[in-house]
Amino acid sequence: MDTTTLATMLDRWESGRGPLYSQLAGAITSLAESGALEPGCRLPSERALAAGLHVSRNTVAAAYQQLRDGGWIESRQGAAPTIGARARGVDSMTLHQRFASILPKGEDSLVRLNDSTPPPAPAVKRVLEAAAGPAMWGADATGYAPLGRPALAEAIVERLRSEGFAAEPDEVVITSGAQQAVWLALAVVGCSGQTAVEALTYPGVFDAMDSAESSTIALPFTHEGLDVDAATRLIRANRPSLVYLTTFHNPTGAVLGEADAVRVLEAAAAAGSIVVDDRVTADLVLSGDRPRAFASLGTDASIITISSMSKVFWGGLRTGWMHVNRTLAEHLRYRKAAMDFGNPVVLQDAATTLLNDHFDETVVWRTAQLAESLEAVTGALTDVAPSWRYTVPTGGPNLWVEVPGADADAFAARAGRAGAPVIPGTTFEVTDGPGRSRFRLPFYLPPEELRRGIKMLATAA
């Protein structure tokens, strides 16, 4: 890396506290942790970096020594130092291992706590029973609608407009669920650039980034959610192609407040980055107001909005969507059609009816079910595992639970053997650390099943 580029990145990162050499070492460490500086990246010489930063060579020498002592850089006599191979979470688990951990399996589990997909809502069963009626065997008797049913696009547009931003049918791409929408956004739109994602993220995101041959920048997370100050600095310094963010974050349940969202969007706009607003769980509001879609906040950021039928209605509908500009939408529709020739007409028609006629009632039903189950979960944790820590989410279907002193992977293995499998926090890590001693606890199951499962987990601990 040339001196000017690194100096610019460090300048945008801003200084911290402590001796100047320690501030410099901390800034380089933060850039390496986030993925902005990758293993093997060659740093400037002490003399060159000192000149670029207008500091003494002794300051740079002391910073480099601190980084060597911490295992962050490696150096050989007569050669410039390089970022070392210190393990980062994104490399610690294969794509197969990550995605396999979240897929439903045929294991004989007593209480499946590793599955964050809901059972079908009552309206889904009624609509699907009626869906295969005479209309299905008419002009579209092939069963194909590769570019998406126009009626479904209209129904999606009405949902988007209800969220406060303009949308037209030719700006909508109908996908086979949210995972395909995420893949299209990251692998097709991102296309070989850097992708900035939250330091904890849904495992399906890793495959999309790998397909795009994208390098990863991890936006730091605290126990309260996204570290907005650090995230905006990273975005401005690195100018990633895409910034991927979620509403009611999976797995933590954290939500980005409106003022903080505007700050991130403005940083993305200044950096020329496209923001992917994943709103798959945005309708599952348990307390407070529904978080606003980024596209409704009036910034200059370019935004791709993603959602699906899965969390409110049922994942088996395999229907999701993207809202993008019309030129990109046309391109993505054909890319999607080339992948699978479109999801079945019968499911698209069922989704249309559900969105038009049953959305509000189903959201009320689903959130009431979740609230009852969440109350059962927190009560059971208080009774049988009072030392475990968590923050009650304001929305979404997951609780992010810390078992103090536990190893996440070992705990998950014991839980699986006990008949109550969970997904360890390490599965969601982009960088090492934020998932240590934690696991994701979905609360879609009925209260009694959840109480039983938590007793089994407490025993396994």
Image (cartoon, helix red, strand yellow):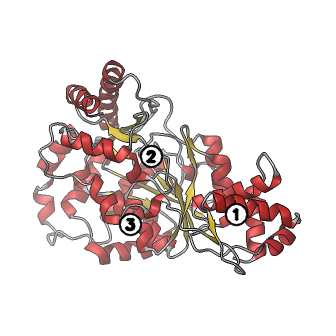
Circle 3 is placed at which residue position?
207
Residue 396: x, y in percent? 40, 39
Residue type for callout 1? Ala
Mark 2 or 3, closer to the camera: 2
In the foreground, 272 or 165: 272
Q: Nearer the viewer, residue 14 or 117?
A: 14
Tell me which amino acid carries mark 3: Asp
Question: Quick one: label 2 or label 3, which is nearer the N terminus?
Answer: 3
Which residue is drawn at the image coordinates 29% and 54% (left, top)? 101
Relative placement, left or right, of 76 versus 371 is right
Can you name the residue that lies furthest to the front here?
Answer: 77
Checking the image for residue 435, the label placed there is: 2
Residue type, numbered disc 2: Gly
Give the percent coordinates (x, y) of residue 63.
75, 60
Q: Secondary structure at mark 3?
A: helix
**Position above or below: 131 against 144:** above
The residue located at (26%, 45%) in the rendering is 413
Question: Does 219 appear above or below 379?
Answer: below
Q: Earlier in the sequence, mark 2 or mark 1?
A: 1
In the image, residue 203 above or below residue 447: below
The residue at the point 31 percent across, 50 percent down is 309
Q: Is residue 95 visible?
A: yes
**Toward the viewer: 360 or 81?**
81
Whole-percent x and y of residue 157? Answer: 42, 55
378 relative to 342 in the view: left or right? right
Give the residue number, with chain letter if any, for mark 1: 237
Q: Give the residue at x 45% y 74%.
A: 212
Q: CA distance from mark 2 to mark 3?
A: 19 Å
Going by the picture, which residue comes out furthest to the bottom?
78
